[in-house]
Image: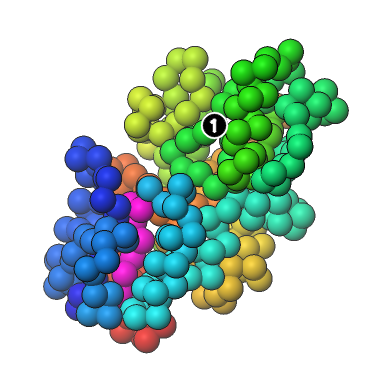
Amino acid sequence: MRLALVTCDSLRPEEQDDRPLLAALAQRGVAVTTPAWSDPAVDWSALDAALIRTTWDYAPRLNDFLSWAARAAARTRLWNPLPVIRWNTDKTYLARLGDAGLPLAPTAWVPAGAPARLASILADRGWTRALVKPVVGAGASDCRVVHTPVGTEEEAFFAEALGRVGMMVQPYLDSVESEGEVSIILVDEQPCHGVRKRPVPGDFRVQDEHGASDTPWSPEPEALAICTAVHAAARPWNGDPAPLLVSRVDLLRLPDGRWCLNELEAVEPSLFFRHGPATADRLADALLARLHAGR
């Protein structure tokens, strides 16, 4: 069995969270390579399957990434499948999940090129503090917290960003600092383990590269129910009737105490195997089961 765990050519040397998965696959006799998605020399047809893992440089080159995914999917089994990748790489999928009844933070969606002003968006909604982020992005790139009154520098940032990509604006949730963002990692849409990610004091970014910390977390029933609802709601739009092989649901606490969906990560989520090493075995077994079943 020949499998690629697809990565990028700019992966940080200290990124080692996939080691348990590599070990689990090796124990099952799988020959694993770790090619960069952008490497033109890779023969994807020589592989039995390719699992997207750490392609964290795709956002500035989304069209190239989607073109690569289409080529790879035509030559081997690609997980998650191409329709899921196309759907999940643009955060406007969250609007569709919100329309389906999933709990989201209030969001102003601003299409690329729109002549919008942050000051007007915040004033219209009565927000005094907001989080601004692109609909295509990873690792909190081009994310910013703004306050009223909105300054000229913030407006210039927003206008420049809108020249490249659509943006989303949400009221800033203080819980990201006090409680952090929580994540549930799922295999075949079944919860495996949970993680709590906390930013450094005074920051909102919960990614490792920004100094955030992460610890094990036991998901509560409300959070697990959201996971089930998210995947059920996503299925009609993600183009694949089968459960997602691997995914991560990110949640934040709303001011009223409820959880809300922050992201459904179904392309290249960090899986935090360091807090749930058994999940690596579950993922390896699920992947091989699909291959043996021809699914």
Q: Which residues are magenta?
A: 48-55
Residue nearer the viewer, 147 or 188: 147
Residue furthest out toward the bottom: 294
Mark 1 is surrounded, within 10 Å at the Cα level, by few (under 14), some (14 to 19) or many (20 or more) other residues, namely some
Residue plotted at (41% across, 34% down):
207
Residue 294: image x %, image y %? 37, 86
Mark 1 lies on residue? 143
Q: Is residue 26 magenta?
A: no
Q: Which quarter shows the N terminus?
A: bottom left
Residue plotted at (60% across, 45% down):
165
Residue 150: image x %, image y %? 71, 17
Q: Which quarter shows the C terminus?
A: bottom left
Residue nearer the viewer, 46 or 199: 46
Residue furthest out toward the right: 124
Q: Is residue 50 visible?
A: yes
User: Which quadrant holds residue 196?
Assistant: top left
Q: Is residue 243 visible?
A: no
